[in-house]
């Protein structure tokens, strides 16, 4: 037994379309572990392979090679899914069903029944504020309502592991906040949430760990704090144009760059290095007028990371 | 087993919501009304039937019934194919299949659920139509030929065979058009043609190769025209079935086609 709720090893997916002429490597040798009771965010540009990973884990697509486990069972075993919830991107419910019917269908398929299911349906609709719409056909739902219903559907069987593919897509700001609150509450109950998203600021707010996927490869994985603060960046304002007096290897080491008139930025790894750098600056007669710490937002980190990866690809 | 039943039930719901039942109901009602009207207006048939009333085997009524059966069963089947064509393709639509597969349901169960669901929908509709027509005839002639009701089974079985083919094409193409066209093609053209070739022209053909070719196709393609023809006639008139071969080979076709569909579906990426 392992504490990991999701484990992939060397997971690879190559889609071949038009009779194998065109091959798309959607996921390449992915090794990823997600432990229980946290919110994990998977980030990546369009086409990075985020949805593919979830589909592989749920047996909707099959891996080309490698293996994976969810809730300590091999992904080939469909019975594991009675403790799993899923909100797909662009989910589509049979339009002729009402919101209540949708929850009934998927609840029943998850092995629930009778009054237990009825109670759960009402509870879930209440939670996502769709109680009034229980009997309305889903074809008359708005986009945000569909998304809320999708979330209710993903939680109907009280799952231990929930996959959400862009859960706040199309939801208004208040609705988003409500969804975030629901997710945090789920986490507090010990559930694991695996989240695909483009909304980095939102991910930053709620996730415990994030992974960054680009072109099927996992570039980084860690806590939001680790990823955004690893290289601490500072901004200083100095008097006069005196930086040319600094030794070249030092400029290179702290990556000193001119930002604006009088303003420079540099990077250090920790507080000790910061102080060392300040000593060097001062010893070289530089007069510091002002200094502020620049923290990367997740977004900045994300963009620079993806750009770096692009560069490496070109080379 | 429970999963298959849930899926079957929701297929029924789907049919109901897509107004398949109302559509069937209206057409059936028309057919029943026309039957009623024809009998109400034509005293002739009444006289003939009345004259034969005390004969054993109640032949005239059976004869009248059979005159109705052939167009009726064909109509039923054409409607059934039309009504059920989209069941599997709709299930396979992006966003819908993803959700179904994320539940603790096996892919086999999904396909069998749609299979039995489609059959149940068609069975209910055909039962309504046939019961209606049967009631009118039976009341009119005060002659209750229960064997007539067997047509419900024969049409449903014939449908099931063609439906398995539609499921195969549904799984392969994810579109309802291909399956529907193939089913119509087999039912309207291929099966009658092969039956004629086997039954009427076989003796006249000299080339052994052509004969073998006809044989191969004849035995492989489901024998819908015989199922709705000779065999239905046999069971309606209360006789025992003369030749079980078309039933058995068609059933084998059904099993084989479902087997192929399932094995393709099991490996398919969505
Ligand atoms: N069924 C499929 N057949 C062929 N190629 C596919 C299929 N599904 C996905 N792909 C390809 O795999 C790659 C990864 O797609 P995926 O949907 O996993 O990306 P994503 O990270 O979810 O993107 P997005 O943020 O736009 O949702 C893309 O290049 C896509 O074109
Ligand atoms: Mg995606």
Image (spheres, rainbow, N blue to C red):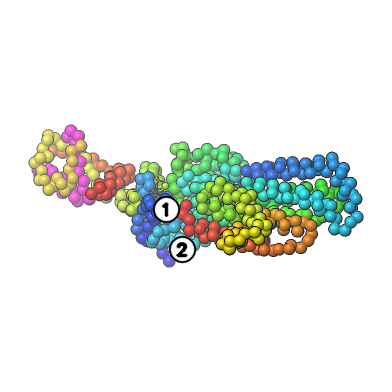
**Residue drawn 49% across and 62% down?**
A77
Name the quadrant containing residue B202: bottom right
Please provide percent x and percent y for residue A71: 45, 60
Say few, some or many: other residues with alpha carbon within 10 Å of mark 2 (under 14 / 14 to 19 / 20 or more).
some
- The circle drawn on residue B165 is none
- Earlier sequence position, callout 1 versus callout 2: 1
Circle 1: element type = loop
Which mark lies nearer to you, 1 or 2?
A: 1
Q: Which residue is mark 1?
A: A19
Tag 1 and tag 2 share a subunit: yes
Q: Chain of mark 2?
A: A
Above or below, B241 against B26 in this view is below
Residue A35 vs residue B233, the one in the foreground: B233
Residue A71 falls inside the magenta stretch = no
* In this picture, residue B206 sits left or right of residue B239: left
Residues in magenta, as a range: A260-285
- The circle drawn on residue A73 is 2
Say few, some or many: other residues with alpha carbon within 10 Å of mark 1 (under 14 / 14 to 19 / 20 or more).
few
* In this picture, residue A154 sits left or right of residue A13: right
Name the quadrant containing residue B153: bottom right
Q: Is residue B96 among the parts visible in the rendering?
A: no
Please provide percent x and percent y for residue B151: 73, 54
Please provide percent x and percent y for residue B75: 69, 47
**Residue drawn 81% across and 42% down?**
B38
Q: Is residue B47 among the parts visible in the rendering?
A: yes
């Amino acid at each position: 037994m392992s504490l990991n709720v999701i484990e992939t090893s060397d997971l690879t997916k190559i889609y071949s379309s038009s009779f194998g002429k065109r091959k798309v490597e959607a996921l390449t040798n992915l090794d990823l572990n997600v432990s229980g009771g946290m919110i994990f965010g998977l980030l990546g540009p369009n086409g990075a392979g985020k949805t593919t990973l979830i589909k592989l884990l749920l047996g909707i697509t099959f891996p080309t090679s490698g293996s994976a486990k969810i809730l300590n069972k091999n992904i080939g075993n469909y019975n594991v899914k009675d403790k799993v919830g899923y909100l797909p991107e662009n989910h589509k419910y049979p339009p002729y069903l009402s919101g209540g019917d949708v929850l009934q269908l998927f609840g029943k398929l998850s092995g629930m029944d009778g009054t237990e299911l009825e109670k759960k349906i009402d509870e879930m609709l209440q939670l996502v504020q769709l109680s009034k719409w229980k009997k309305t056909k889903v074809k008359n739902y708005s986009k945000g309502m569909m998304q809320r219903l999708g979330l209710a559907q993903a939680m109907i069987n009280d799952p231990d592991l929930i996959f959400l593919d862009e859960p706040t897509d199309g939801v208004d700001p208040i609705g988003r906040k409500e969804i975030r609150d629901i997710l945090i509450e789920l986490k507090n109950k010990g559930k694991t949430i695996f989240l695909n998203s483009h909304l980095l600021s939102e991910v930053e707010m709620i996730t415990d760990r994030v992974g960054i996927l680009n072109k099927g490869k996992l570039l980084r994985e860690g806590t939001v704090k680790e990823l955004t603060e690893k290289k601490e960046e500072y901004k200083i304002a100095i008097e006069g144009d005196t930086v040319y007096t600094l030794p070249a290897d030092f400029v290179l080491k702290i990556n000193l760059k001119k930002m604006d008139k009088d303003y420079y930025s540099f990077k250090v790894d920790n507080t000790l290095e910061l102080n060392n750098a300040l000593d060097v600056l001062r010893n070289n007669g530089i007069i510091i007028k002002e200094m502020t710490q620049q923290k990367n937002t997740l977004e900045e980190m994300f963009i620079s990371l993806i750009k770096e990866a692009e560069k490496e690809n070109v080379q | 087993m429970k999963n298959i039943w849930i899926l079957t039930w929701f297929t029924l719901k789907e049919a109901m919501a897509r107004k398949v039942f109302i559509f069937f109901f209206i057409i059936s009602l028309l057919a029943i009304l026309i039957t009623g009207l024809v009998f109400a207006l034509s005293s002739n048939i009444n006289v003939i039937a009345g004259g034969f009333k005390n004969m054993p085997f109640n032949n005239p009524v059976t004869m009248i019934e059979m005159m109705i059966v052939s167009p009726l069963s064909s109509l039923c089947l054409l409607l059934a194919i039309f009504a059920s064509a989209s069941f599997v393709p709709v299930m396979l639509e992006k966003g819908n299949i993803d959700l179904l597969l994320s539940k603790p349901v096996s892919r086999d169960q999904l396909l069998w659920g749609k299979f039995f669901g489609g059959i149940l929908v068609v069975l209910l509709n055909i039962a309504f139509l046939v019961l209606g027509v049967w009631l009118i005839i039976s009341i009119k002639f005060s002659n209750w030929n229960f064997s007539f009701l067997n047509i419900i089974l024969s049409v449903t079985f014939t449908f099931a065979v063609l439906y398995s083919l539609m499921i195969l094409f549904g799984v392969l193409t994810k579109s309802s058009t291909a399956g529907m066209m193939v089913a119509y093609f087999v039912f309207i053209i291929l099966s009658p043609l092969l039956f004629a070739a086997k039954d009427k022209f076989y003796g006249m053909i000299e080339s052994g190769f052509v004969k073998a070719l006809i044989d191969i196709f004849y035995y492989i393609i489901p024998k819908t025209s015989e199922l709705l023809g000779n065999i239905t006639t046999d069971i309606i008139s209360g006789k025992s079935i003369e030749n079980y071969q078309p039933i058995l080979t068609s059933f084998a076709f059904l099993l084989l086609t479902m087997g192929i569909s399932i094995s393709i579906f099991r490996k398919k990426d969505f």
